[in-house]
């Protein structure tokens, strides 16, 4: 399907979107909800997305191509954690072909919510010609609206779409009505009277700011509409029914890996190998998959299986359901666990 020349609508529009951010901020979850289809694997642990993947949304005459990138890491971090080269250079490559860039920040992480990572700032500086928008994720986990407003101001350096969002003679914080301020910010117009001026660790060239809870699908529709409206007249890159450039085998393996990450402790998941053993579709349209999970030692194998097989059954059950949702067909999944000989 990928190699087919796409049939163009009368007035084709196209937008290529790169979503970047630190590991585990919710990029894949956001794309899945915008697509309304589970395309990108997610896990509670970091480094689930190992390389760039494309997801394609078509609505009417508009095609949006999303680039789901690994979390932004530097070379030292990649070497320290033995990460593939694609995880270090992936985000950088995605921005080269993107029309717009979404920068996602986890506002529930109080250590990182008030300052953009230096590697992200470097990427933005290299691609200053591209429109960028800020996505504050996990707002449901941040109780203080005041802190949310302060994070917005710091991350944007007090400027959104070329407009200053502060005033030097602004009233004191305690005189402001937080409910009113939050409502104004949420509607897209950051008021000049919000918080004091600051200029550390931010980017003053964001076109828009979005506050979302990607997991709860809260605020995601606003981003979806913004992207559809930002598309320009240009021919489509992919056929209408093309959804992702990921190999189906790779989707299955990544899904199982993400569930292993969710259910196993500490370093164990990173010492396991997974590979497709069998792959077959029967006459009834049921997809039969067998995946081998190899542990480097007996302890790892026992951890994967769990007491009375409870862990592996849970991994298999959740993986099967997720694959059925992704492939939109009935799936029979068998996981085979043994030690590397």
Image: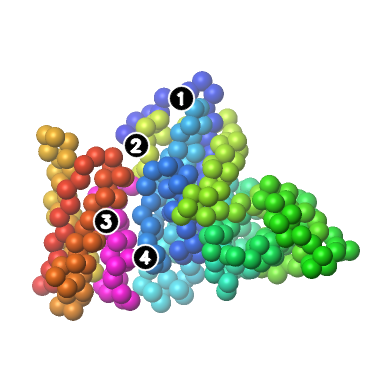
Q: Marks 4 and 1, Cα distance to the nearest angstrom?
A: 37 Å
Q: Secondary structure at mark 1?
A: loop
Q: Judge whether residue 301 can be spotted in this image.
A: no
Query: Which of pointers 3 and 4 indicates the residue nearer the eye?
Result: 3
Residue at x 38%, y 51% (from the top left corner)? 40
Q: Let me know if residue 23 is in the magenta part.
A: no
Q: Residue furthest right?
A: 169
For mark 4, what is the residue? Answer: 84
Residue at x 21%, y 58% (from the top left corner)? 316
Query: Which of pointers 1 and 3 indicates the residue nearer the eye?
Result: 3
Residue 290, picture quadrant = bottom left
Which of marks 4 and 2 precedes in the sequence? 2
Q: Secondary structure at mark 2?
A: loop
For mark 3, what is the residue? Answer: 318
- Which span is picked out in magenta? 246-271
Q: Marks 3 and 4, Cα distance to the nearest angstrom?
A: 26 Å
Which of marks 2 and 1 precedes in the sequence? 2
Q: Secondary structure at mark 3?
A: helix
Color theme of the render: rainbow
Which of marks 4 and 3 precedes in the sequence? 4
Specify few, some or many for label 2: CA neighbours under 10 Å numbering under 14, 14-19, or 20 or more: few
Q: Marks 1 and 3, Cα distance to the nearest angstrom?
A: 38 Å
Query: Which of pointers 2 and 3 indicates the residue nearer the eye?
Result: 3
In the rendered view of the protein, which quadrant contains the C terminus? Answer: bottom left
Q: Judge whether residue 16 can be spotted in this image.
A: yes
In the rendered structure, find residue 8 and report the number of the disc placed on it.
1
Pick whichever, 6 or 158, lies toward us. Answer: 158
Q: Let me know if residue 247 is in the magenta part.
A: yes
In the rendered view of the protein, which quadrant contains the N terminus? Answer: top left
For mark 2, what is the residue? Answer: 2
Q: Marks 2 and 4, Cα distance to the nearest angstrom?
A: 25 Å
Residue 143, picture quadrant = bottom right
């Amino acid at each position: 399907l990928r190699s087919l020349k796409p049939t163009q609508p009368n007035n084709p529009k196209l937008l290529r979107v790169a979503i970047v951010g630190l590991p585990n901020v919710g990029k894949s979850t956001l794309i899945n909800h915008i697509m309304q289809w589970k395309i990108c694997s997610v896990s509670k642990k970091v480094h689930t997305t190992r390389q760039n993947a494309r997801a394609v949304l078509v609505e009417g005459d508009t095609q949006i191509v999303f680039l789901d990138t690994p979390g932004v890491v530097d070379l030292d971090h990649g070497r320290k954690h033995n990460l593939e080269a694609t995880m270090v250079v992936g985000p950088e490559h995605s921005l080269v072909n993107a029309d717009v860039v979404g920068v996602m920040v986890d506002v529930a992480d109080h250590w990182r919510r008030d300052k953009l990572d230096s590697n992200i700032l470097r990427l933005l500086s290299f691609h200053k010609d591209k429109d960028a928008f800020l996505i504050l994720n996990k707002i449901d986990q941040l109780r203080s609206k005041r802190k949310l407003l302060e994070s917005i101001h710091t991350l944007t350096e007090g400027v959104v779409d070329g407009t200053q969002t502060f005033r030097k003679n602004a009233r004191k914080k305690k005189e402001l009505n937080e409910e009113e301020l939050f409502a104004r910010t949420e509607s897209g117009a950051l008021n000049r009277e919000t918080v004091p001026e600051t200029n550390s660790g931010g980017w003053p060239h964001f076109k828009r700011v979005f506050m979302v809870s990607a997991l709860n699908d809260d605020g995601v529709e606003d981003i979806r509409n913004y992207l559809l409206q930002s598309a320009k007249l240009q021919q489509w890159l992919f056929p209408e029914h093309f959804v992702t450039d990921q190999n189906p085998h790779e989707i299955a393996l990544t899904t199982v890996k993400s569930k292993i990450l969710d259910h196993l402790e500490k370093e164990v998941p990173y010492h396991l190998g997974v590979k497709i053993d069998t792959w077959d579709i029967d006459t009834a349209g049921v997809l039969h998959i067998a995946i081998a999970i190899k542990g480097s030692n007996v302890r790892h194998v026992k951890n994967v299986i769990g007491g009375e097989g409870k862990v592996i059954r849970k991994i298999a059950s959740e993986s099967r359901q997720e694959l059925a949702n992704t492939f939109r067909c009935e799936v029979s999944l068998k996981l085979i666990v043994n030690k590397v000989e």
